[in-house]
Amino acid sequence: MEIKAVISRIISSYKTSIVLLLIYAVGLAFATLFEKHFGTLAAKMMFYYSPLFLLLQFFLVINLVSVTIKYRLYKTSSWGFIVTHAAFIIILAGALTTHLFSEEGTIHIRENETSDRMLIQTNRGDNFHTLPFSLELKKFTLTRYPGSSSPSSFESTLIIHVDGKSEERKVSMNNILDIKGYRLFQASYDTDEKGTVLSVNKDVAGRNITYTGYCMLVVGFILCFVRKDSRLRQLSRRLKQLKNTPAQLFLILILSTISLSANTHKDSSNIVDALQKNKASVEHAALFGALPMQSRDGRMEPINTFSSEILRKLHSSNTMGELNSDQFLISLLTFSEMWIHVPFISNKNNDIAAYYKLTEKELAYIELFDENGNYKLQDKLEEAFNKPQNMRNKFDKDLIKLDERVNIFHQLVNFKMLNIFPKENDPNHKWYSPGDDLSEFPTKDSVFVSNAMTQYLKNVQTGLQTGDWEKAEEMLVKINIYQQEKSNTLEINQKKIKAEVTYNNLDIFRLCKKFYLILGGILLAISFTSFFRKQKWVIWTTRFLTAAISICLLFHIFGMGMRWYIAGYAPWSNSYETMIYVSSICVLGGLVFVRQNPIIFALATLFGGIILFVSGLNWMDPQISPLVPVLKSPWLMIHVAVIVAAYGFFGISFLLGITNTVMLLIQKKNKSSVLSNNIQEFSIVNEMSLLIGIALMTIGTFLGAVWANESWGRYWGWDPKETWALITIVVYAIVTHLRLIKQWNKLWLFNLLSAIAFLTVLMTYFGVNYYLSGMHSYG
């Protein structure tokens, strides 16, 4: 009986819950590293679908039920807790049902062929399953972005033969086809575009159970936030009590400041001086930058956007000396024979510079060729490209990047890449550069396209000599008229072009970064002053700074809105955009808590500025690109918006956790109690922010699962991004549940762990993108 009592006590212990969750998180993390080296299938067999992992999840469910019964949580009106945790059990039950009883495979059909066989791949090999219907591919259609090879959408026109009847239906990405309990998804296609590959999934029971769990999860979190007895409401009441407690407050916080300085490369050579002096006027460069062009991925954009991207790519900067990006591009096209001698092409790998005897950090194009005109990088480049991607070292990767910059420069000076000339009645909607093959153009058009840029650059030289830019501007007008007359297959949205030029010139997020760092720093200093004496000027200055930061936040949101309008989709589809979004949420989250304590808002504002600073680093790509077909889903906007909003609240908790940890250390050394009120206040806000963050993270993750199921027929494929999102949820669940264990309910432990837990957010966002492999790997 004693052994049985001990087992029962262990099973129904909160400590057991924490230990099981910790083992689960560590196991998942190790599995993603194993997957990187040995592949997804091996990771699934060794970890995700192994009996040990299934047993661990079973113990988690048993522990949750036992804790609920032991502590009679069903009688304490903790309905938010009960519904939320019951939802997880139902979701796991749905996942188990899917794992045991679902059917999943692919079907490959060529045009005018019929098939009723689904290929199922397992660890035991491939086998075929006969479907209760047959599919005939009438036509496969691939639509590309105008003038590029990037797919915009693809769909299959099918004739469904079922129960003696035939019906024509279409299936495309994010457009599912349901037949007799089976769901068909557009997965891929043959290279000759005459065949289609469809994903087939049958999981009616699993889907219904899982979706029920998702709905319960949302209801549970709502109850956790709105009920009077919820943890969030309890924390809010405690915070109000603390605010009404008179106490002399004193705060000592040591902040490290990072001096961000830009190193300007100075070259006193005559060539550089001549190029800097002989530059197009700002007004003329702006007219040149406003001219529409077609990007490599088919998007219509102003030359200003293209020139900015090119300059960042080549020179890792937004300016080249005194030249802005448009002036730089005009100068490069006009004086290409001079630019080949200028060391401005970025190369940060000193080993490459030493190996080839190149100028460090920045090199000239001409340095890359020997006396016989041979390309110095060729041999090592071939070796690098022949290696698998995961076997390439830093030298290989940086050499490939350098070669890309060299190719860009080479194409530009040969009048390529600048796609400003449409071909009339072109079914592919492609625009051309003066240096492209123009043999298919009508003779008259070919002559104009070939000569227009040459004539324009001659007029530029005249303008540089005389200061009269009239002829050069007239040539730009002629090119623009030609564009409007010949682009009859593709509409040029002049409003969007102008909006994009304005967006580029405003440089909204760079300005917001500066204001957040400056205003947040001043607010932090003023907030410290308020602890010594509550003077009127301090109160009014705090209010003014709060209003100024709020205006900056509105400007930030306005910039996101402009990007949304220009791109045509929600601006959180890549690493750069999500960082911009996280920054806004972080500042907004701090604004929510400003009434509790302005220091929280100051820290959140500073953190928002730091995030914008990181987003502006050279390895971040701010380019607006067309979406791949699978991302053209409303689920993308909802899923990413919610899950990235969670990162903002986790960021606030990270800052509060660090601040409180420092304050606790100071209090311990000084044996003083004057900081206790502040520490408690910050800890309460920290926990409130964590609760909001974990709710958003959980809902956002499972919204992603719904998106995956509606787009390609599975909720969860143990992709590293999915797995690390789950690890983040589990880790923050551990942090927020430590208070249930008396020995572990310590302020220092909670605050320290709330800061350490942010490492999982960084791994989910950066580590997976740039280190691990998978569908969400961007690096």
Image: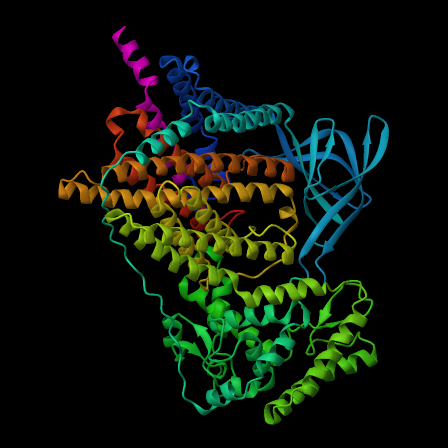
From the viewer's perspective, is residue 283 above or below residue 132? below
Of residues 284 and 733, the one drawn nearer to the viewer in this rendering = 284
Query: Horizontally, is 223 left or right of 120 in the view?
Result: left
Q: Name the residue: 71% across, 65% down.
A: 494
The quadrant in which the N terminus is found is top left
Q: Is residue 16 magenta?
A: yes
Residue range of the region highlighted in magenta in the rendering: 1-30
Q: Name the residue: 56% across, 73% down.
A: 408
Q: Position of residue 220 (x, y in %)?
A: 50, 25
Q: Is residue 176 magenta?
A: no
Query: Horizontally, is 71 left or right of 315 in the view?
Result: left
Q: Which residue sits furthest bottom?
A: 466
Query: Horizontally, is 238 left or right of 292 in the view?
Result: left
Of residues 143 and 472, the one drawn nearer to the viewer in this rendering = 472
Of residues 131 and 263, the one drawn nearer to the viewer in this rendering = 263
Of residues 378 and 274, the one drawn nearer to the viewer in this rendering = 274
Q: Name the residue: 51% across, 37% down.
A: 701
Q: Name the residue: 65% across, 25% down.
A: 204
Q: Can residue 405 be seen in this view?
A: yes
Numbered circles on residues, count: 0
